[in-house]
Amino acid sequence: MSVRPNSKTEPALPGIYQRIVNEYPSVAAAHDQMAAAVEQVGPLDQKTCSLIKIGMSVGAGLESAVRSHVRRATQAGASREEITQAIFQGMNTVGFPRTVAAWSWAQTQFQRDDKHDEIIPRLEL
C-alpha cells in the first residue's frame, strides 16, 4: 500500500510520483515498502534518516530527491537550520556549486511548504 500525505496537513506528493502510483501501483507499493524497511534497520529516527538522505541527494545532484527529502525532514521535525547544515556538509566533498544548487532547491521547497501552510488554515475555516 502506498503512503500518501494527509491532504489537510501535508503537501501533495510530486505529480510524477502520483502518476507512477496511479499507473504502476505495485511498483509504488514495493518502493514504499522498501523505504519503510530500510528506515527500520537500525536505531536512527525518521528525522536523522531524512537528513542523511538529503546529504546523499546533494552528492548525487538529484534536485527532486533533495526537495522530497527536505519536505520529509521538515515533516519529521527538522528545522530549516538543520536542513541547511545537512546540505552544507557536502561542500568540501562535492563542491561549492553543487552545494549552492542544493541549497537553492531547498529554498524552493521551503517556499512551497510556506504556500501550503498559508492555504491549509483557510481551507479549515
Image (cartoon, helix red, strand yellow):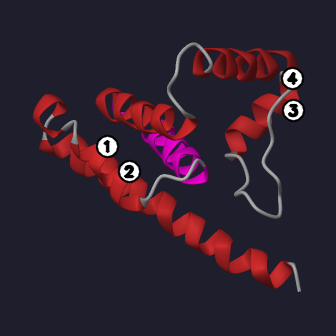
Disc 1 vs disc 4: Cβ atoms closer than 8 Å?
no
- Are the residues at dot 3 and dot 4 in contact (C-beta closer than 8 Å)? yes
Instruction: Residue 74 in the image: state x and y as whole percent.
Output: 54, 53
Instruction: Describe the element under mark 1 as helix, strand or loop.
Output: helix
Prevailing secondary structure of the magenta residues: helix
According to the picture, the residue beneath numbered tag 3 turns out to be 22
Q: Which residues are magenta?
A: 61-75
Quick check: 17 above or below 28? below
What is the secondary structure assignment of the residue under circle 2? helix
Asked if labels 3 and 1 touch by Cβ distance under 8 angstroms, the answer is no
Number of the label disc, if any, that sits on residue 86: 1
Residue 119, compared with residue 37, is above or below; it is below
**Residue at 61%, 52% in the rendered image:** 75
Task: Tell me the quarter of the picture where residue 63 sits.
Answer: top left
Q: Quadrant of the C terminus?
A: bottom right
Q: Is residue 102 left or right of residue 120?
A: left
Question: Mark 2 and mark 1: span between their CA atoms?
Answer: 5 Å
Amino acid residing under circle 2: Ile
Residue 4 sits inside the magenta stretch = no
Look at discs 3 and 2 and give the one toward the viewer: 2
Q: Which residue is mark 2?
A: 83
Residues tagged 4 and 2 counted as in contact (Cβ below 8 A): no
Measuring 71% from the left and 36% from the top, which residue is drawn there?
17
Q: In the rendered structure, which disc, 3 or 2, sits on the residue that comes first in sequence?
A: 3
- What distance separates the C-alpha of mark 4 from that of mark 2? 31 Å
Name the mark nearer the viewer: 1 or 3.
1
Q: CA distance from mark 3 to mark 4?
A: 6 Å
Q: Position of residue 96 (x, y in %)?
A: 13, 44
Callout 2–callout 1 Cβ contact below 8 Å: yes
Is 108 situated left or right of 102 in this image?
Answer: right
